[in-house]
Image: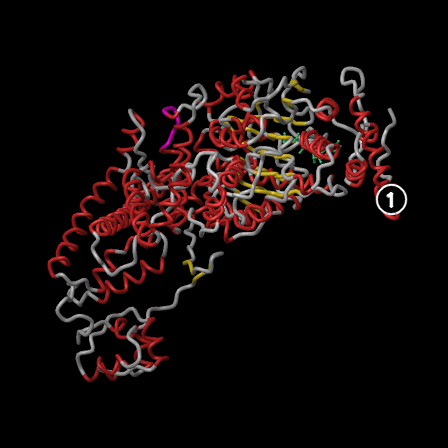
Amino acid sequence: MAPVTAGKKKHTKSIHEPRPLKRKREDEDLDSLNQRVQDINVKEIEYETFASLPLSQPTADGLHASHFKTLTDIQKKAIPLTLKGTDILGAAKTGSGKTLAFLIPVLENLYRRRWTELDGLGALILSPTRELAIQIFEVLRKIGRYHTFSAGLVIGGKSLQEERERLGRMNILVCTPGRMLQHMDQTAAFETDTLQMLVLDEADRIMDMGFQSTVDAIVEHLPKERQTLLFSATQTKKVSDLARLSLRDPEYVSVHEAASSATPSTLQQNYIVTPLPDKLDTLWSFLRSNLKSKILVFMSSGKQVRFVYEAFRHMQPGIPLLHLHGRQKQTARLDITTKFSVTKNSCLFATDVVARGLDFPAVDWVIQLDCPEDAETYIHRVGRTARYERNGRAVLFLDPSEEEGMLKRLQEKKVTVEKINVRQKKQQSIKNQLQNMCFKDPELKYLGQKAFVSYVRSVHVQKDKDVFKLNELPLEEFSASLGLPGAPKIKFLKGDNAKSLKNAPRQALQALSSSEGEDSNREAKAKKNNTKTKYDRMFERRNQDVFADHYAKLVEDEKDDRIDDTGDLDEENGFLSVKRRLSDVSIISGEDNNDLGPKISDDKRDGQNLTKATLAIDSKRKAKLVNSKKALLKLKPKGKKLVFDESGNPQEIYELESESQFQAHGPADSQKAKFLAAEQERLQNADVADKQAAKAKRKEKREKRNAAVRGEPDGEARVVLIPTHEGGDEEDAFGEGGASADELESAREIEREHEREREREREPAKMKRRKKWFEDGPGDETASKRRAQDMMQEPETAEELEAMAAGLLG
Ligand SMILES: Nc1ncnc2c1ncn2[C@@H]1O[C@H](COP(=O)(O)OP(=O)(O)OP(=O)(O)O)[C@@H](O)[C@H]1O
């Protein structure tokens, strides 16, 4: 067997060759290559280098140019078999080079069949995530650079129309299952009958529940006669799965079956037991002690990721922070993965969207802040470090209730993790800081509430109840550790937990219901009068302070305007009361002042704004006094020393007491306890107000929706409902922070009905056509024509719209 010498570009030498001669030589080369592939004896020969493998010149050159010389174990076993056309189940540890093990055969098998652009789709490579698809595509571009195949990347978040136009011309497609199926169902010009090879990277993930129906539908579109390759670090061997993919006598190629560990030997794996409420303290302390590292932190939900990212960012740990989760726009996701790839020291907070397959260079640490759902997920997460012969470290954080169960699951999968302890000296607490931040910033508190709810939900939905024991988790303390004044109410909890959680915010709930009574009185009054004043609207909408400080201030100012000296609402007199506070006068601008009496110049107004003293202008003398800067100065309070914090807000300076003054208040511990109790109460009171606001918002929404159902023309903006996303919005299942699932669902149904009505009005003929199209049998001659017509429609789904706004096929 003559080895092909990589690097010698025979195909470039033949540029000036006469065409018949060139053709003849190419035929001879191809015959010889086919012969050498046929001669491969998989049982006897083990290929060490790519140069010794029977590969085409363009592939050999591509590998050489990408600096790949020797084969990894999985490549040694899988490539010879796949070159001969065998179906394969490939299993090898993370970072062991599975990507090349399927890309080389894809290129080679199409090359040996003389595949050209005119032959259509030759190979389809499915990946569970967009990021992984992009990465595979990049490797394909690198090693396939001397081939003449056309290759495309089909992942959501790009223009569907442009993808459609180019799809029909592609020989190799790398794609995510959902997007691929969309094209198979909707793109008339996209034919898949010619397909030769189907590859599933991270096959076990693609075959599991989440993608099951999509993959089944994709396979229905594909010819049965094809080669199928399945690769993963945690491979599926389920017969039912293999039957679904109609594999023909597949070979199981595993290179870690006999190994003592399922993870790379260069990976050091540890776990620490840290109670749930201390997790963030431990993570913070860890980051503070590893500022010069590249760290990847896994959490169970996007909401957790957002909260921890926002909170830590404000506290500035001293290492650049990044965050990534599935709800981000595709461009942002790409930007973040690129940034994390190129930086030397940074910390990326992420969900499992990056757990599989992604090849970030030189990650030092993988931290699993939230326990992975199973041992497979653990293996994939830690696999983001210690890739291809590099070293790496992984630390798993476990709550005491998770320790025993999770260790057992890991042992079953041949994963050994060693317990380590946190150095108490280095442990810092950030609980007070978080509480302070949440108190000051309602938006952060809102994120914290969502993070809490989504974490609890993620534990609740876990299947493995030996590991995830919701009843044993100290949820109240956990919510406090996120800086929240009380644990948000969660509807699905039954039994003791539900009781303890319910009891906690009871005070708040009582306050809420009584205030709701006030709200409805006010609304009833407004309805009776049948006119809505500016104030009524403002009070109806005051819940907006959940998001905006300035709105709360605005409402406060308006409230002030409504209060006269006696403190009563000044409904009859409105704004223009003669008796008013000087500070009120000062906020009225320009011409209005003429109506109000004494005119005040701008600079004086500034001074007056500063005076907090109340002065009734009920005599000429007082009116004169308003014009005297000197007299006004006397009314001003003395200046205070202020310092400005990081956000530029002025803060009063605390004067330190002397030792004896301090001791006079009692022992330090009891003073501390008193202070904390007072702060806790302050936070809880503030929380009551926030919850009241949130409730008012829900009510407002509900009423708008009901009005929409009744078809009342309210003259206000229509209620825009959020389209249903995959997995739904966490809020749906919970009472806190949004409408209930039923409310949202019925609202969505109403919205969908409106949409259908509008659609019927617009184009009745089109609706009929579409119905007919779905009913078409395969023999219907006009079906494809109609299909093409349908393709020309405007995008209708949220995904299509999103796709229209972004880029195009890679
Ligand atoms: N033959 C080789 N020689 C040198 N480096 C290689 C070789 N094969 C792969 N690599 C490198 O090893 C790293 C890991 O490869 P790859 O991403 O294919 O691993 P994987 O087995 O698919 O991992 P995962 O299970 O996490 O998806 C990559 O950076 C790749 O460039």
Query: Seen in the image, is 401 located left or right of residue 157?
Result: left
Estimate the x, y position of residue 388 in percent, counting from the top left. 71, 31
Which quarter of the figure has residue 466? top left
Which quarter of the figure has residue 583? bottom left
Numbered range of the magenta stretch: 471-475
Q: Is residue 184 magenta?
A: no
Query: Seen in the image, is 57 located left or right of residue 598?
Result: right
**In this picture, is 728 found above or below 443?**
above
Query: Seen in the image, is 69 located left or right of residue 782?
Result: right
Q: Is residue 473 magenta?
A: yes
Q: Nearer the viewer, residue 120 or 217?
A: 120
Q: Nearer the viewer, residue 185 or 487?
A: 185
Estimate the x, y position of residue 357 in percent, counting from the top left. 61, 33
Which quarter of the figure has residue 30? top right
Residue 555 is at least partly visible in this image? yes
Instruction: Find disc 1 in the rendering and name its residue.
Output: 14
Characterize the magenta stretch by its predominant secondary structure: helix
Estimate the x, y position of residue 800 in percent, counting from the top left. 47, 47
Q: Residue at x 83, y 40 (%)?
A: 23
